[in-house]
Amino acid sequence: MRAIVQRTLGLAWVVPALVLVGVFVYLPLVQNIGFSTLKWDIYSGDQEYVGLDNYTKLLDDPIFWSSFGNNLLYAVISIVFQVFGALLLAALIESIRSDRWRRSLRAIYFIPSAISLTVAGLLFYFMYEPNLGPLNHAFQAVGLGLFDQSWLGQESTAMFAIIGMSQWQGFGYSTLLFAVAIQRIPSELYGAAAIDGTGPIRRFIHVTVPLVREMTGLMTMVTISGAFQVFNEVMVMTSGGPNNSTQVMGTWLYRSGFVRNNFGYAAAIATLIFVITLGIAMAQLWVTRRRRVEW
């Protein structure tokens, strides 16, 4: 009887949280799927059921596929820098013997992550400015003026310029997480490897990398998921231009719904983003469960 009372009391504490999650998370998801089957003028309120027509239009929309490709490019470059690059930098920092230097370097690399994406975007917008921006002036100062160009004004460079800003902003955060994971590795393992005559590169490959693989898998999935939810960086720096070359799924969703007044189509894009990120989250749970590291 006592156990039943305790379970009932526990359930009473959980129910309010379940209600809030259901109302503010799952209900909007279900509603959005319903909206994606409509042709909806959000200004007049006119609605027309069109079934899967919005999803069919997605398959024939070249801008959507260009946006998807930009998200994919964003994910690949982010994995290179914010996962593998951050792991390497974290290992270098943690290999420094001076505790003061380790703490200082962690703080220095983390500072950009404390800056909001909007502020970082405006900062790099100024840096990329072709006439007054410091980037082109720096190329001229070292005799590389042939690289001067309108970084955000050309289709060939605009997306890479935005991704560059994003890597600068998020690199330190990933480095700090990997540093924490490396700190959890028992020092005895490094001591044993040193006694065996193993050099720093082999210690990194055979000790550090295997024992932080759980964090590596987690960061990979989080990075990919974040790459498919990019919005602020693009809106602040280019708003999807020039000529839609920097559109990502988030900005194309916004433009379709609130600029082109095609809310049902925007809801279909949102549903697809949800499916992609849900798949990534499920893969993350599966990978971390199978690759859990114990020592």
Image: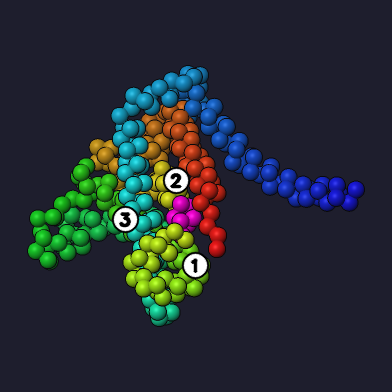
Magenta range is: 212-218
Helix, strand or loop for disc 1:
loop
**For mark 3, does the 10 Å Cα neighbourhood hold few (<14), some (14 to 19), or many (20 or more) residues?**
some
In the rendered structure, which disc, 1 or 2, sits on the residue that comes first in sequence? 1
Q: Amino acid at mark 3?
A: Met
Residue hosting label 1: 185
Q: Main secondary structure of the magenta part?
A: helix
- Closer mark to the observer between disc 3 and disc 1: 1
Q: Amino acid at mark 1?
A: Ile
In the rendered structure, which disc, 2 or 3, sits on the residue that comes first in sequence? 3
Tell me the quarter of the image containing the C terminus: bottom right
Q: Position of residue 294 (x, y in %)?
A: 55, 60
Rendered residue at 16%/57% (across/down): 131
Q: Amino acid at mark 2?
A: Ser
Which of the labelled discs sits on residue 132, or is there none?
A: none
**For mark 2, does the 10 Å Cα neighbourhood hold few (<14), some (14 to 19), or many (20 or more) residues?**
many
